[in-house]
Image (cartoon, rainbow, N blue to C red):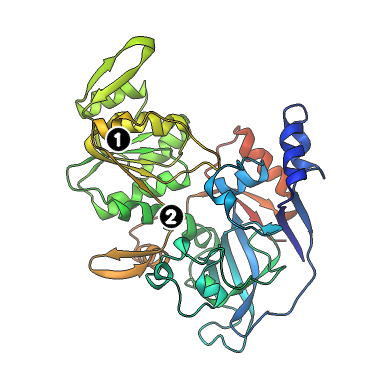
Amino acid sequence: MKSISFEVNVAKIVLTKLAASVFPAVYYSRLSPIRYADIPPRPLPGENWIRVKNRLAGICGADMALFFVQAHPKISIAALPGVPRVFMGHELSGEVIETGKGVRDLSVGDRVVLQKYLPCCSMKEIDPPCAQCQAGNYTLCENFSEGPRLPDNLGAGFGEQCILHRSQVIRVPESMPDSCAVMVEPASVSLHAVLKRPPASGEKVLVIGAGVIGLNVIQFAKVIQPGCTIHVLDKLPFKREQARAMGADVVFEGDPYDEVRRYTGAHLYTGALANRTLVGGFDCIYDCVGYSSTVHDSLRWLKARGDYVLIGNQLSPVTFDMTPLWQQEVRMVGVNAHGTERFNGESISSFDLVLRMYTENKIRLNEFVTHRFPLSEYASAFRTIRDGREKIIKAVLEME
C-alpha cells in the first residue's frame, strides 16, 4: 500500500535544510525526510477501527511546511514528544471498505471525510476523556502526548488506504461529489474561525489572504451576518476575483495602508524610517496568512478594541510590534482547526454545520478544486504549488 510520510529524522531534516540553498531539488530527492513507499498491510488494530479506501486528498499549507522542512525546532509544539514517522494528508475524502465488529453506525460503502487527524482521547479510547475532549474540542486535547500510543502504520490521506478509529470520521451524503467532500475539512476551519468571533451587522471586516481558508471565511461571514462589509487583501489578481465571486464587498487594489484609510476613515500617520500606523480602522481582521508582516500590519489596521483572528499559521517564530495590543487595547484570537460550535443556541460540530449549510445551499464548495495530480506524481504537485505560476485554489491528490 503506497503512502507518503515524513520521517522525523533530525539528521535528514538538518541536511535537507542546509542543502536546499544550493540544491533546491533536494526536497524531491532521497535525502529529503519525505518518503513515498509501500507500508506493510496490517489488520484493524481493534473493534472500533475502520479501513478506508482514499479517493481525494487536499494539499494544505501544513503539508507544504512539512514537505519543504519549514518547521522550526524552537516552536512550542516541537517540544512535545513525537513519533518517528508522520503520515501526511488530513483533507481526505474516502470510502469505508472494512469495519471492526464494534462499529455499528458505519457500513462498507459509506463515504466519509477525516475530522480528527491528530491524537486525542477518543482515538486513544481514554475514559474519562479530558475536559477539552468532553467539550468536543478535540484539537485542544490535553492527552495529545499522554496515554497509550496509537498503533503504527495506519497511513493517512496521502495514500491508497488508511486505517482510522471510528471517532475520526464523519459520514457525508452520497450525493456530495468527492471534490466537495474533500473541502469539508478546510471549510470547517474557516467556519470555526468566523464563529470564534462572528461579525456584527454594520461592522467592517478585513480578510487577509484569498486562498481556500480566506474564501471560505468570506462566504461563512456573509451567511452568518449579511449586514457586515467584507474587505479582502490578496496580492494575486485571480484570487481577488474569486473573493468577489464569494461575496467580498471590497477588494484592495492599492497600497494597503492607504486602502485601510480610504475604506474605514482611519487617520494615517507616517513617522521616521517610513514607520506608518493608523488610528481607527477595522472592527475585525481575519488573518489567513499569519506571516510576521501580516500580524504586524493587522494590529495597526484595527480600531481601538478591535479583534485580530489568527487562522493562517507558520511553523516558525514570527516577529511583530506588540505596541497596538496595549496602546489600542486590541484583542488577539487564535484558531486551531475546528471543534464544537455554539450556533443559534445549538451545540454542533464544525463538520456537521458545514454539511448542513452545504445541503441547504447556503455555501458553495464545488469551485475550489482547480488542480488534480495522481498520487504517484506528488512531487510535481508540491513543485507546482510552490512555483506559484498556475492559478491554483486547491490542488488535490487522486488515488490511482
**What residue lies at 28% left-to-right and 54% top-to-bottom?**
223
Disc number placed over residue 189 in the picture, else none: 2
Q: CA distance from mark 2 to mark 1?
A: 25 Å
Location of residue 315 with respect to 398 vertically, above or below: above
Image-quadrant location for residue 90: bottom right
Image-quadrant location for residue 84: bottom right
Estimate the x, y position of residue 380 in percent, counting from the top left. Answer: 71, 43
Mark 2, other Cα within 10 Å: few <14 / some 14–19 / many ≥20: many
Location of residue 355 with respect to 285 vertically, above or below: below
Residue occupied by mark 1: 325
Label 1 secondary element: helix
**What residue lies at 55% left-to-right and 39% top-to-bottom?**
316
Location of residue 349 with respect to 128 vertically, above or below: above
Q: Amino acid at mark 1?
A: Leu
Location of residue 292 with respect to 136 vertically, above or below: above
| 122 lies left or right of 38 | left
Label 2 secondary element: helix
Circles 2 and 1: CB distance less than 8 Å?
Answer: no
Estimate the x, y position of residue 169 in percent, counting from the top left. Answer: 52, 71
**What residue lies at 44% left-to-right and 47% top-to-bottom?**
213
Q: Earlier in the sequence, mark 2 or mark 1?
A: 2
Image-quadrant location for residue 91: bottom right
Mark 1, other Cα within 10 Å: few <14 / some 14–19 / many ≥20: some
The answer to which of 392 and 5 lies nearer the viewer is 5
Task: For the C terminus, give its image quadrant.
Answer: bottom right
